[in-house]
């Protein structure tokens, strides 16, 4: 499955939570850590059936659309 199709599977309420995280973290100088965004979204949606990698892709997509700098700090060992 491509990144684009996985990103389309993210529920609108999860996208809204990602957007809220981005808005809240906008006050910080520099890039935000993707791992912190994943933690924040999972606190709000503990039953979310997306892997960390798919969620990171959605977060990255939203951040890039919003013009935010990101620190992609998850690797294969933290992907799922």
Image: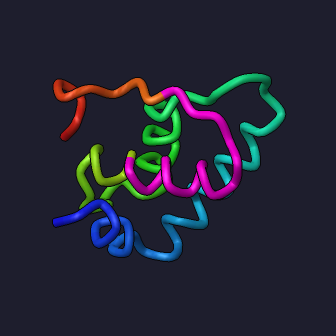
Give the main secondary structure, helix, strand or loop, of the magenta stretch: helix
Nearer to the camera, 46 or 70: 70
Q: How many marks?
A: 0
- Residue found at x 28% / y 66%: 6
Nearer to the camera, 49 or 30: 30
Q: Is residue 16 above or below residue 30?
A: below
Q: Quadrant of residue 24?
A: top right
Nearer to the camera, 58 or 47: 58
**Residue 1: image location, x then y, percent:** 16, 66
- Residue found at x 37% / y 66%: 7
- Residue found at x 36% / y 52%: 55
Q: Quadrant of residue 73?
A: top left
Quadrant location of the C terminus in the rendered image: top left
**Residue 68: image location, x then y, percent:** 68, 42
In the image, 16: left or right of 30? left
In the image, 33: left or right of 25? left
Q: Is residue 78 above or below residue 14?
A: above
Q: Report the coloring of the rendering.
A: rainbow
Q: Is residue 34 above or below residue 6?
A: above
**Residue 40: image location, x then y, percent:** 52, 42
Magenta stretch bounds: 57-71
Asked if residue 66 lies in the magenta stretch, the reply is: yes
In the image, 67: left or right of 39? right
- Residue found at x 60% / y 66%: 16
């Amino acid at each position: 499955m491509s990144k684009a199709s996985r990103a389309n599977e993210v529920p609108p309420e999860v996208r809204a939570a990602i957007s809220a995280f981005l808005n809240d973290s906008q006050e910080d100088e520099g890039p935000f850590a993707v791992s912190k965004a994943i933690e924040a979204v999972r606190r709000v949606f503990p039953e979310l059936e997306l892997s960390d990698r798919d969620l990171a892709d959605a977060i990255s997509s939203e951040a890039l659309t919003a013009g935010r700098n990101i620190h992609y700090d998850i690797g294969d060992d933290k992907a799922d």
